[in-house]
Image (cartoon, grey):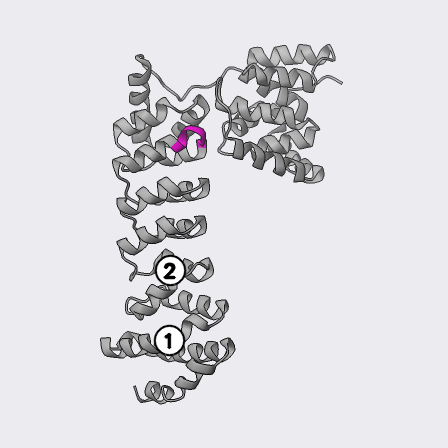
Amino acid sequence: MAEAKSLIPGLDNIVRDGDPKRRGEAVRKISELFLRGASRFQPAHVDLFDGVLTSLVPQTEVEARSALAERLSDLVNAPPQLVALLVRDDEILIAGPLLRRSPLIDEPTLVDIAKAQGQSHLLAISDRSTLTPRITDVIVRRGDRDVIRRVAGNAGAAFSQLGYTGLIRRASDDGALAVTVGQRDDLAPEQLKHLLAQSVEVVRRRLFDAAAPELRNAINRAMQDITGAPTHLAVTRDFATAQRAIRKLHQADELDEGALLRFARAHQYEETAAALAALSGVRIGTIDQLLKGDRDDPMLILGKSIGISWATVRALMTLRLGPGRSPAAADVEEARQNFERLVPATAQRVLTFWQTRETASAIPLPL
């Protein structure tokens, strides 16, 4: 420890009069010294570094504090007062690494930070390898869509009954979240039934398609309880009738955006899919998979590549949710902005890829 002690006499002036750069350089040097010997330091040695660094760090620049937090985030014997100081920083670049990984951050501290800080801090906490119900209760109550999706997908997160109720409520207008929650190993049968009861058909099918065999059986049992009759979500749609109708519309020169919009608004799924296949040259099986997918992006790409308006694209988004349901306003606005920014040439390249996957099955259109 002689080398560490030799630094201390010169620190008084730096602490009292040093500018952020001088302080930052001192922090870097002392941190390097600590990190080199951290694995063999005794508690008294750690306390020495803790006191020195805690006196210097608050007045250093963000970059210096961020770099230090990153390096301390995995240490089990990091200076505890210093970690406690850094983890409560308002700057996520500093607090983030410690919130995600530090083994020194206890449950009360995480709860306090989750209650007081914003979404970026909540997102970082949601990445921890383990989370107790006390912490997730706060996250579910305060988190935005990205935070909720992240914590729901964390296998190390545990949820109380209240937390699961909140997750399932939030999943009522978020299909991606519903699929994530539905695949959790700790979801009770009654909670799965509640989740399915409030989910639209496309989300139920999406969850079924993504599920392991055991979960598929549980989903079908839950659906039977909900509907009162045997239900099997693994069904294949019959597009033959719709394809014939769309072919006739095309031959009569009546297959246009207006027809597509009418089908979508009437929730005529098969006719809408067949119309999209005909207008885009993408096989109907691929269109079906795109409509049943987790995201609205394929609808934006299809819309931009075949030249339809935002109103029709929005109708396609609503079709995916089923009758009587609408996408959340925030999702609609985000999709609208993405649609406006989407470059037609980019959309066309993606469309070409979809067309060439299995062009032989696409609906033939007469010239």
Which residue is labeled 1 in the image?
55
Name above or below for residue 350 compared with residue 12.
above
Residue 9: name its quadrant: bottom left
Residue displayed at 41% across by 65% down: 70
Name above or below for residue 326 compared with residue 296.
above
Amino acid carrying mark 2 in the image: Arg
Amino acid carrying mark 1 in the image: Ser
Q: Position of residue 26 (x, y in %)?
A: 44, 80
Question: What is the number of callouts on the image?
Answer: 2
Residue 37: name its quadrant: bottom left
* Left or right of 347, for residue 70: left
Name above or below for residue 264 compared with residue 128.
above
The residue stretch that appears in magenta? 170-175
Residue 88, numbered circle = 2
Q: Where is residue 244 in the image (x, y as percent from the top left)?
A: 62, 11
* Left or right of 302, for residue 194: left
Q: Position of residue 263 (x, y in %)?
A: 60, 15
Foreground: 300 or 198? 198
Residue displayed at 73% across by 17% down: 366
Magenta segment: does it hold 202? no
Residue 129 can be seen in this image: no
Instruction: Name the element at disc 1.
Output: helix
- For the residues marked 1 and 2, what is the alpha-carbon distance in whole angstroms? 16 Å
Residue displayed at 72% across by 11% down: 251
Of the residues under marks 1 and 2, which one precedes in the sequence?
Answer: 1
Quarter of the figure that contains the N terminus: bottom left
Outermost residue to the left:
43
Q: What crowding class fits label 2: few (fewer than 14 Cα within 10 Å), some (14-19), or many (20 or more)?
A: many
